[in-house]
Amino acid sequence: MALTQKKIEIKNKRAEHDYFVLDTYNAGIVLCGTEIKSIRAGKAGLTDSFCYIRDGEIWVKNVYIAEYFYGSFYNHEARRDRKLLLNRREIRRLAQETKNPGLSIVPLLLYIDENNRAKLKIGLVRGKKEYDKRQTLKEKEDKRMMAEKFKAINMRR
């Protein structure tokens, strides 16, 4: 009987609220041993993080991965820059796209894939204006109200 592992997904909730996601990519992330153990324990955060391209390589900055409790002097820094693994073609395309004003690269989701490797879903994004944010919240609230009403109707039957 195979043991089932719990699914580890750490979302950047602010990205959904602050940006329009135009395109997404799944990237590998270069980690040390204590970092992957902290991610598997669910002790990471993507708030206020972003990606940048330097010397043909893509890096993620400000991703919080808590220090591993049992890691002695081998522990890592919680908010260090980490290299992402993408194809050269994808990096070139992202570099070309981010030259356009208003576009940037933001981490959306940190997860463990089926091969037990940490992956980072990054998105090419455009910032929302205040009225866009209000409209998104209104649509979300309307959708929730409709679901409530449908549930109430189905319960009566």
Image (cartoon, rainbow, N blue to C red):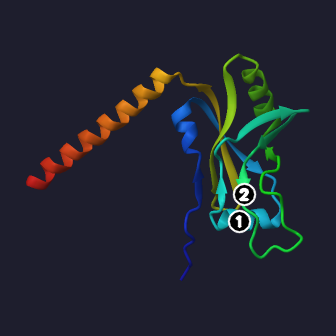
Vertical placement of 37 versus 113: above or below?
below
Q: Is residue 65 left or right of residue 32?
A: left
Look at label 2 and name its amino acid. Answer: Ile
- The x and y percentages for residue 32 are 83, 62
Q: Residue at x 83, y 35 (%)?
A: 88
Which quadrant of the view contains residue 126? top right
Residue farthest to the bottom? 1
- The x and y percentages for residue 76 are 83, 61
Q: CA distance from mark 1 to mark 2?
A: 7 Å
Q: Residue at x 71, y 65 (%)?
A: 38
Look at label 1 and name its amino acid. Answer: Ser
Q: Which mark is residue 38?
A: 1
Residue farthest to the top? 101
For mark 2, what is the residue?
65
Residue farthest to the right? 55
Which quadrant of the view contains residue 103? top right
Q: Nearer the viewer, residue 16 or 58?
A: 16
Vertical placement of 14 versus 98: above or below?
below
Q: Are marks 1 and 2 in contact (CB under 8 Å)?
A: yes
